[in-house]
């Protein structure tokens, strides 16, 4: 089992190292991740939302539906924990 | 070649971290160890994602000065780190803790039923009882 | 970003990860995972992701460690591997 795990891990690692060759260099300001959506946030966030912290502006103003979905996920997880770990009453199955 | 390795050294470190987590998820028999491996795997991916937004010579994405934005000072995009990966990964961290909580609840249920947390012992008990 | 600091923190993180999956005492493994989370938080501060570092320090290292300790205290502490 351990040998199989090691072989699988080494194969996945080789594949990932091969794939990482196409990534841009670290800290490159002109990489694709840094040049399409985020300049608009950096330029407009303070003006439109009057919040100096761009991360909170994007989190709570531009993408607030995302944050709402996150709270739904956390609520569902808490509900699942409570339902799984509650004390069973007598005669209750499961 | 050496230049190539050094310019992307952070990616190699994240790959090593991810492989440690993957090995713990597949190779370890204890269920808590598997969960620890899952946590390591998740945080390695989050680390990779955050590191794509790093710009050399930039500062944290909080604008200095007063927060009213009169538009007098010119904002340079290259001076602030990309905030978008941070926003997405904030959500991912909280969701990862939620999944860990559900996994731990399942773990406690498994322990109550089989009285062990080793994967091979659980499989043996299941085979003996014929489930 | 300072690459020397980054490299040292990355090495500490890898050492913590290897130790966390190799220790036989599960409580020790969980505490090492907490240390791993705090090193991760330092690394994010160094990368400039201060909000992510805040969340990791409170949620990842705090709540996560508490959840794991609760699980270990409700179940067995020894592990075979």
Image: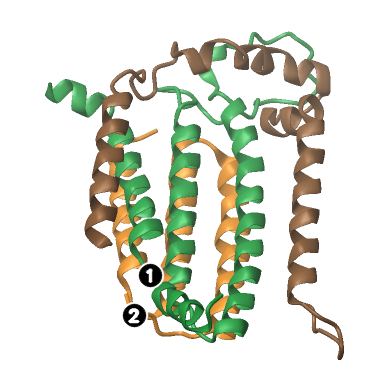
Chain colours: A brown, B green, C orange
Neighbours of disc 1 within 10 Å: few (<14), some (14-19), many (20+): many
Nearest the camera: B1 or A75?
A75
Picture disc at residue B71? none
Q: CA distance from mark 1 to mark 2?
A: 8 Å
Q: Secondary structure at mark 2?
A: loop
Residue at image x 85%, y 83%? A92
**B37 or C56: which is nearer to us?**
B37
Residue A90 in the image: x percent, y percent? 86, 91
Residue A63 picture quarter:
top right
> Image check: C43 left or right of C9?
right
Residue A24, above or below C6: above
User: Where's the C terminus of chain A, which quadrant?
Assistant: bottom right
Are there few (<14), some (14-19), or many (20+) residues within 10 Å of tag 2?
few
Q: Residue A27 at x, y = what percent? A: 39, 23
Name the spot of residue C62 as percent of width and height, x first: 60, 64
Q: Position of residue B92 (x, y in %)?
A: 62, 43
User: Do the numbered discs 1 and 2 sit on residues whose CB atoms are within 8 Å?
Assistant: yes
**Above-or-below relation of C25 to C22:** below
Res C44 seen here: yes
Give the left or right position of residue C68, taking residue C33 as reference.
right
Residue B78 vs B30, above or below: the answer is above
Tell me the residue at 65%/25% (across/down).
B63
Q: Which residue is mark 1?
A: B29
Pick the quarter of the image with the N terminus of chain A. Answer: bottom left
- Give the letter of the chain under mark 1: B
View extreme (bottom): residue: A90
Task: Name the residue rendered at 75%, 43% in the picture.
Answer: A70
């Amino acid at each position: 089992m351990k040998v199989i795990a090691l072989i699988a891990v080494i194969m996945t690692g080789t594949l990932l190292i091969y794939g990482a060759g196409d990534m841009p260099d670290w800290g490159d300001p002109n990489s694709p991740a840094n040049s399409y959506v985020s300049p608009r946030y950096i330029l407009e966030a303070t003006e439109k939302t009057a919040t100096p912290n761009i991360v909170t502006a994007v989190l709570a103003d531009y993408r607030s539906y995302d944050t709402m979905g996150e709270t739904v996920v956390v609520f569902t997880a808490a509900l699942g924990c409570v339902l799984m770990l509650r004390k069973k009453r007598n005669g209750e199955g499961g | 070649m050496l230049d190539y390795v050094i310019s992307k050294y952070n990616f190699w470190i994240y790959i090593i971290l991810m492989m440690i987590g993957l090995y713990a998820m597949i190779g370890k028999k204890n269920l808590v160890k598997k969960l620890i491996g899952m946590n390591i795997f998740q945080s390695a991916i989050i680390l990779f994602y955050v590191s794509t937004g790093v710009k050399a010579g930039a500062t944290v994405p909080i604008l200095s000065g007063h927060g009213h934005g009169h538009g007098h000072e010119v904002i340079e995009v290259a001076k602030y780190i990309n905030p978008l990966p941070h926003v997405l990964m904030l959500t991912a961290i909280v969701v990862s803790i939620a999944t860990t909580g559900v996994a731990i609840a399942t773990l406690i249920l498994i322990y109550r039923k089989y009285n062990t947390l080793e994967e091979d012992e659980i499989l043996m008990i299941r085979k003996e009882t014929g489930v | 970003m300072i690459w020397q600091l980054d490299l040292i923190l990355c090495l500490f993180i890898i050492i913590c990860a290897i130790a966390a999956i190799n220790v036989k005492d599960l409580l020790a493994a969980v505490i090492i995972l907490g240390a791993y989370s705090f090193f991760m938080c330092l690394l994010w501060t160094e990368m400039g992701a201060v909000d992510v570092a805040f969340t990791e320090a409170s949620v990842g290292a705090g709540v996560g460690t508490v959840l794991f300790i609760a699980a270990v205290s409700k179940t067995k502490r020894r592990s075979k591997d």
